[in-house]
Image (cartoon, rainbow, N blue to C red):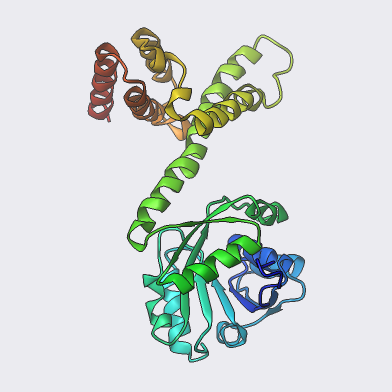
Amino acid sequence: MRADGLAPARLAVGVVSAGRVGTAIAEALERAGHVVGAVVASSTASRERAAARLPESQILPLDQVVARSELLVIAVPDAVLPTVVGQIAAGGALRRGTVVLHTAGAHGVGILAPLSDLGALALAVHPAMTFVGGVDDTNRLATSCFGITAADEIGYTIAQSLVYEIGGQPVRIAEADRTLYHAALAHGANHLVALISDALAILDVAVARGAAYHDEPPVRAANAILGPLVTAALSNVLDLGPAALTGPVARGDADAVAAHLAALRELPDTGITAGIPAAYIASANRAAVYADAPPKLRDLLSRAGRNDTENR
């Protein structure tokens, strides 16, 4: 609802395509009252997803989706985006005044220039959220921030309105900073998954060895051990920043870190445990910067990093 009490204009929405992100955005826009009339869904998974979660939307070829749309949402992988933009520009179905937004994090509106040249209003609207393919993806959008980029204030106003309508929080990102913005999200979220997966793999080894002394090993013990700890750590760092850092690096305990490295180097250097010592060293080095760790610990990590490189 606008400040003047009037409902915002309802738009005919087309989505390219019904992947995880596109479907969630489409559902959120429908909840806000827009009409998602048509979607592109090329794969079997996309068609099934569209049928289940966008049952009133027609599955149509790209040009027909473009022709029907007042708001065209392009939700495709970053690497595919230039190709799709080119296909839309060459198709001849785009109408002047169509609002075209893409959801790629690393790109601003420059990549939509072929469509802007045809009279489209270009927006970059990226949800800072991870998507797994279920209806919870849509629900999470209502608590998510969106990195928005536009060519002018009119574009920013429209992007902000769309984000507010679905319950999100728009954050302006300059065109030149889109890659930096995306790198931060990838480092904080995607690499976090890799970090936690490493920790779980290490714990699985320790728990399995302990379980050898019992008739039945604990079920998902590594998850149970690590879950509360990392949940608390994430909450603390979001509240306190680097001051939330605890553990041996924060204490400057070089002996404990050396013992960790010795134990990690006993893991098999194959499969998912290969490279874990190097990952530990890299993360410990970053922690040492935030903790202003003493020279003894920094020297230990520096030597360990060199040795790891030389042994590969």
- Quarter of image, res 295: top left
Please state which of residues 232 and 20 is positioned toward the viewer in this rendering.
232
Q: Is residue 289 above or below residue 238?
A: above
> Where is residue 85 drawn, in percent x and y?
44, 77
Q: Is residue 222 above or below residue 59?
A: above
Query: As drawn, which residue projects farthest toward the front?
Result: 4
- Quarter of image, res 149: bottom left
> Where is residue 86 drawn, in percent x and y?
42, 80
Please state which of residues 161 and 38 is positioned toward the viewer in this rendering.
161
* Residue depicted at 29% across the width and 20% down the height: 301
Q: Is residue 122 visible?
A: yes
Please state which of residues 120 and 132 is positioned toward the viewer in this rendering.
120
> Where is residue 267 drawn, in percent x and y?
44, 22
* Residue depicted at 38% across the width and 58% down the height: 178
- Quarter of image, res 5: bottom right
* Residue depicted at 41% across the width and 70% down the height: 109
Q: Is residue 29 above or below residue 182?
A: below
| Left or right side of 5 for 43 | left
Q: Is residue 207 above or below residue 37?
A: above
Labels in figure, total: 0
Q: Which corner quadrant holds the N terminus?
A: bottom right
Q: Is residue 45 visible?
A: no
Q: Which corner quadrant holds the C terminus?
A: top left
> Where is residue 192 drawn, in percent x and y?
49, 37
| Left or right side of 198 for 217 | right
